[in-house]
Amino acid sequence: MWFWTLSVVGDVWFGFSWLLNQLPKFNPVKTIPDMVALKRQYDLPDGTSTLPGIDVFVTTADPIDEPILYTMNCVLSILASDYPVDRCACYLSDDSGALIQYEALVETAKFATLWVPFCRKHCIEPRAPESYFELEAPLYTGSAPEDFKNDHSSVHREYDEFKEHLDSISSAISKRSDAYNSMKTEEGDAKATWMANGTQWPGSWIDTTEIHRKGHHAGIVKVVLGHSIRGHNLGSQASTNNLNFASTDVRLPMLVYISRGKNPSYDHNKKAGALNAQLRASALLSNAQFIINFDCDHYINNSQALRAAMCFMLDQRQGDSTAFVQFPQRFDNVDPSDRYGNHNRVFFDGTMLALNGLQGPSYLGTGCMFRRIALYGIDPPEWRHDNIVVDDKRFGSSIPFLESVSKAINQERSTIPPPISETLVAEMERVVSASHDKATGWGKGVGYIYDIATEDIVTGFRIHGQGWRSMYCTMERDAFCGIAPINLTERLHQIVRWSGGSLEMFFSLNNPLIGGRRIQALQRVSYLNMTVYPVTSLFILLYALSPVMWLIPDEVYIQRPFTKYVVFLLVIILMIHVIGWLEIKWAGVTWLDYWRNEQFFMIGSTSAYPAAVLHMVVNLLTKKGIHFRVTSKQTAADTNDKFADLYDMRWVPMLIPTTVVLIANVGAIGVAMGKTIVYMGAWTIAQKTHAALGLLFNVWIMVLLYPFALAIMGRWAKRPVILLVLLPVAFTIVCLVYVAVHILLLSYLTF
């Protein structure tokens, strides 16, 4: 009865979760940006533009787990994007406070004086040099083919030197610091880390001290490139390489380094805290009307992407009520077979795109453009009151920042930021200090939401709850690309954080059932689905372990009559997959993407999702939230194999249930074969039918766990045919063992 009861509860939950997933797709709408109309309306004949300003945020947490080369390629793609130079600013947030990140950014700015004009002159795509130079035969669409060969070879050579400079920064800082410390410090004093200008770095030091370490240092703001109207003092590398950029715009967008202050006495609030620090600092400098944020391992793959998002923000029909525009996430380091479903196109191209017919997609953490005042917690125009009070209890005590908020609300646009002065920089460092947002509305009703592992979904929910809408933007050439964890363990750690954060949202004040006073009904259902889906894994795990019943001598039925029950399930599953086929047909998703989604959901349901549920139970009992773990983007040591991480098996406790399920199903199939040999003459037709249907279930589980079986094989998985040989061998061994044990027991009992 206990198993029957759990089965009924599980089936009811499966039906409920399926409805939660289907109902928000009631009115799917595809939207396409009209770039020609945008250009016609906002680009002027003299080459200038009246497009609004954009502040681009890039966040990085650790130069080891998130390699500097990835981060700098992200910055270069932003500096080279096709958007008015005087209306775009890039802010890099470095949560490590390491000097190596700042000096790498300075080197990047120097290389950008060559790379950006090269991209503009020859219409380069993509504009991240690492990805561009990996292309074997890039399609040329520029207007100067006679110069391209010489320019390409010169820039490629300079890029190789640029990467060597990045690699040498760490040793250069160490040598410089040792030299300064030998001259300027006495024995027993702390060994400081020194900048190139002979001053001590205010962030974390190589030889850490109490106030100069990761997690405890002062706030830092440094303007690497000023506004284009004031120029920059980096010089141009074009003249030294005999490159002709006479008819090309060589100006660069503004570039700013930020490392928010940290103190052990205050919660740093992870990525949300870093984004809010950027939000405040940028308000004092550029105060752009719109903001777009990127993880440091993403880059702009389509130089028109910023303009595409602006098409929705400036749409005369619903633009003023659009709080954010979300782009799908794409990855260019995933293995061709996408073994662990990293592309997740069923979600990005199906589920999210379908939400366009409601209030719009949720915020997905990166590649999302926001309206600044929506992040400030201001209501959309149709709900907004006149004379909004901007006070220090809500926004903090900085007077210049409060003034910038008022200007943003009143849409007082200024494309030229104030001159860079010591007073301005000091105020910017003040608003990124560790304690600035304490006892304010930051992280609650203002900015990105705190106290949760997945700040993205909750932030989007808070904005939708105020009545704003969002849009989903897809482009023929993918807007952005990034790096995904192709190692199974890293991928599952990522899933634990996402799903755990979703469960945290359900048990918080942002619960979709009670929060969001102006959120639409079906939009609320979509958020409910996003917060409770990990619970489904508990019932899937129960069913996946049910093959151990083959080891029981007696027959165990989930339901009676068993045959009709299994046929009923097969019909239901078939109907669900037919509906899935219609969805992927509409979304343009391939069958491989759909199948990988099914397989990885099974792997996650026996590992990451139950782990997230367990974390949530611990959280409810101990009030300790989901541990934030930066997903490592470092690859395995084998540099000759692009997908070396794919074959590196790293065992962690959460993989135990999946392993048990795999072994149980292998054993069940072997035992079923053994029982067939032993009892074939004694079984009735009904028993044979039951055995065949049960065996079909076992085989289905095995097919879904196929990627996990490959992961266990490690480098042997490069030849999947080995697995196809090993599995029948394993089935046969179990079968023979079962028959042998049965014969021995029978002989013993007879004796």
Image (cartoon, rainbow, N blue to C red):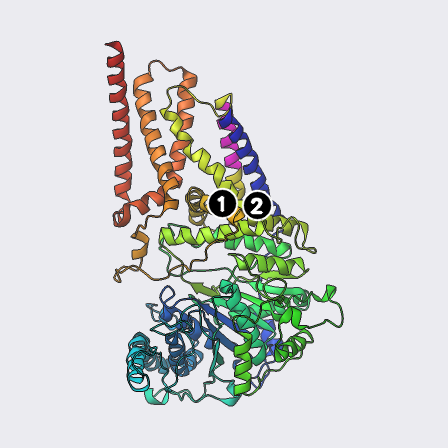
Secondary structure, mark 2, is: helix
Q: CA distance from mark 2 to mark 1?
A: 19 Å
In magenta, the rendered stretch is 563-575
Q: Is residue 75 left or right of residue 288?
A: left
Q: Which residue is mark 1?
A: 613
Residue 300 visible in the displayed image: no
Mark 2 touches mark 1? (CB < 8 Å): no
- 279 falls in the magenta region: no
The amino acid beneath tag 1 is Val
Q: How many marks?
A: 2
Structural crowding at the residue carrying mark 2, measured as other residues with C-alpha within 10 Å and reported as few (<14), some (14–19) or many (≥20): some
- 573 falls in the magenta region: yes
Main SS class of the magenta portion in the image: helix
In terms of sequence position, does the residue under pointer 2 or pointer 1 come before the other? 2
Q: What residue lies at 57% left-to-right and 66% top-to-bottom?
A: 33
Residue 181 visible in the displayed image: yes
Where does residue 32 sit, x and y in percent of width and height?
57, 63
